[in-house]
Image: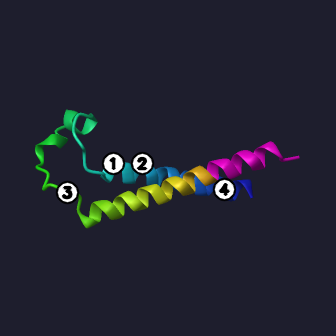
Amino acid sequence: MTLFFTIILVAASVLMVLLVLLHKGRGGGLSDMFGGGVSSSLGGSSVAERNLDRLTVGIGVIWFATVIALGLLLAYQN
């Protein structure tokens, strides 16, 4: 069971990194430092951005639940 949750945690972690990197820079951060501030904003978030936000939050919840489950499994393992 621990192996299953470890695999889920690694997959969720990789997905979180990729999803966060896909987000559009809001300015003043690392994205501006590497030339991300060159693009113009069209005044509002698009449907794709909202879906990306929802997906990121969903993967974050899965990641958090997996960390808690692994912690409980390892704490009460005999």
The dot on residue 21 is 1
Q: Earlier in the sequence, mark 4 or mark 1?
A: 4
Q: Amino acid at mark 4?
A: Phe
Q: Is residue 22 above or below residue 50?
A: above
**Residue at left offset 54%, top offset 55%:** 61
**Residue at left offset 42%, top offset 48%:** 17
Which portion, as a residue range, is magenta?
Answer: 66-78
Q: Earlier in the sequence, mark 3 or mark 2?
A: 2
Q: Which residue is mark 2?
A: 17
Q: Earlier in the sequence, mark 2 or mark 4?
A: 4
Crowding around mark 2 (Cα neighbors within 10 Å: few <14, some 14 to 19, many 20+) is: few
Left or right: 68 as drawn, with respect to 18: right
Q: Secondary structure at mark 3?
A: loop
Q: x%, y% of residue 54?
A: 40, 61
Q: Which residue is mark 3?
A: 44
Q: x%, y% of residue 13?
A: 50, 50
Crowding around mark 1 (Cα neighbors within 10 Å: few <14, some 14 to 19, many 20+) is: few
Taking the magenta stretch, the answer to whether it contains residue 67 is yes
Q: Are marks 1 and 2 in contact (CB under 8 Å)?
A: yes
Distance (Cα) linking label 3 and label 2:
24 Å
- The chief SS type of the magenta part is helix
Crowding around mark 4 (Cα neighbors within 10 Å: few <14, some 14 to 19, many 20+) is: some
Q: Is residue 67 above or below residue 62?
A: above
Q: Secondary structure at mark 1?
A: helix
